[in-house]
Amino acid sequence: MAWIPRLRKTGISSTNAILSTVSSAGTPRRHFHVCPALRAVAAQGRELRYTETHLDTIFALSTHPGKAGIAVVRVSGPQAKSVLKSMTLAKSPFPKPRQAVTRRLLCPQSNELLDKGMVVWFPGPRSFTGEDSVEFHCHGGKAVVDGILRGIGNTGPHVRLAEPGEFSRRAFENNKLDLTEVEGLADLLNAETEAQRRLALRQADGGLKNLYETWRTQLIKSMALIEALIDFGEDENIEDDVYDNAKRQAAIVSPIPGTTRDVVEVSLDIGGYPILIGDTAGLRSSQDEIEMEGVRRAQDRIRLADINIAILPVTDFITSNKIGGSVDPIVLEAVRKNVKTMVLINKMDLPGLDNDEAMAAVKSVLWGDKNQVLCDEGEDQRRLWAISCQSGDGIGQFLNDFIKILKDRP
C-alpha cells in the first residue's frame, strides 16, 4: 500500500482530515467528500486520491465529566449504526430518526447490562457533523460512563475516541458549519457573562456569516459591473437624455480629413434597443496608404452592418450657393447603391444658408440620376435628415425616426 502523506505540513490539526490509501494496483477505494483543506493541498500540484472524509467512527462524552444525573455520549461516523445495534438488544426495533427511545445499554462483548437510558439516531447528512450519528443518554456516574465508553470502543477496529474539537471540525468539513459559526460555537462554550453569551450565540447562529455574505455579494456585483464596463464599454440610455448622449465623444475628433483610421465602437441603449455603433474612417480617395487602409476597413464594416449612417456636411453639396460641391464618388456610390444607408446632412445652421435650397441641392447630387438608385423617391426621402451637430437642431427628430425604424425591422 502506498500511503499518501498526512496534512500536518499544511497547518491542519488533522487526525482524520484524512487521506486514505491507494492500493498497489492503483485502484482507489470509494470516493467521498473532499474538505477545503485537501483542495488547498491539491492546488499545490500534488496528485491526491480521496476516500471517505473519515474512515474512523469517533465517540466522546459530550457532557461535563464527573457525577451528574445525566450524561450524553455522542458517536459519529460510518459505523455509528452498527455501534447502536451492538450496544442495544438485538431484538429491539431500530429507532426512528431523531426520536428519543428508551433502551437497555449492553456491553458488546459480554451482553452485560451497563445502564438503562435513551438513544437518539441521526442519519446523515441531517446531523450535527453531516455523518451518521447516535447519542446515548445515560446516568452520569463515573462507572456507568466509563463502561459505556469502553463498550463503544470495543465495537469495531475503526471506532476510537474523538480528538478535542473533532466533531466540530467534521461539521465544518462537511459544510454543516462555516468558520464563523465554529468560532461562535467555541466562544459560546467558553462564555462566562451574559454579554459574551449573546455575542457568541449571535455569531454561532450565522450573524457574522450573513454580514460577510452581504459584503461578498456586493463585491461580486461590483466586479461584474467593472468587468462589463471593461469588456463592453459604458452603457448609455438614449431615452433618458437623447441629446447629451448623442454628443458624448468616444474618441478624439479633428476637422482634418483622414485622421480617423481605426473603428471606434460605442454601446448605446436607444429606445430600449441595444445598439453597437462603430465610428469608421471617412470614405474618400487618397494616395496615403495608411488612410486607404482605414477606408478599406470602413467599407468592410459597412458591408457587415445592419444600418449605415453617413454624416455629410452640407458644404460638400454647395459652393458659393451653387449646386455642385465636392462629394467623393466613393461616398455617392455608398449612398446610392446601399439602401441600408441613412444620410445626415450636417452644418445646416451655417449663416445665410437657405435650408430648402440646400436640401434640394443635396437631393439633386445624391439622387439626380434615378438610374443609379436602387429604391424609389419616397424611400430616398425617408433616409435623409438635416441636422446640426453644433446646435443640436434635427438630432432629436432623427433619433425618434431611428427608433421607429428599429421597431419596424423584422
Image: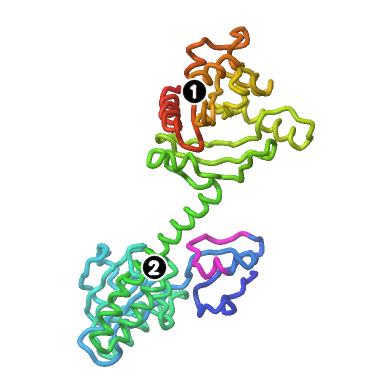
Instruction: Describe the element under mark 1 as helix, strand or loop.
Output: helix
Q: Which residues are magenta?
A: 27-40
Image position of 211 with respect to 263: above or below? below
Q: x and y percent of residue 408 in the render?
A: 42, 22
385 horizontally vs 41: left or right: left
**Secondary structure mostly seen in the magenta stretch:** loop
Quadrant in the picture for residue 205:
bottom left
**Residue position marked by numbered label 2 in the rendering:** 212
Q: Is residue 109 visible?
A: no
Image position of 69 with respect to 373: above or below? below
Identified at 58% across, 12% down, the residue is: 374
Instruction: Describe the element under mark 2 as helix, strand or loop.
Output: helix
Q: Is residue 304 visible?
A: yes
Quadrant in the picture for residue 329:
top right
Q: Earlier in the sequence, mark 1 or mark 2?
A: 2
Confirm whether the magenta stretch covers residue 221. no
Q: Mark 1 is on which residue type? A: Asn
> Looking at the rendered structure, which numbered label has been put on residue 355?
1
Q: Front-most of 220 and 270?
A: 270
340 horizontally vs 183: left or right: right
Q: Mark 2 is on which residue type? A: Tyr
Q: x and y percent of residue 233 in the render?
A: 53, 47
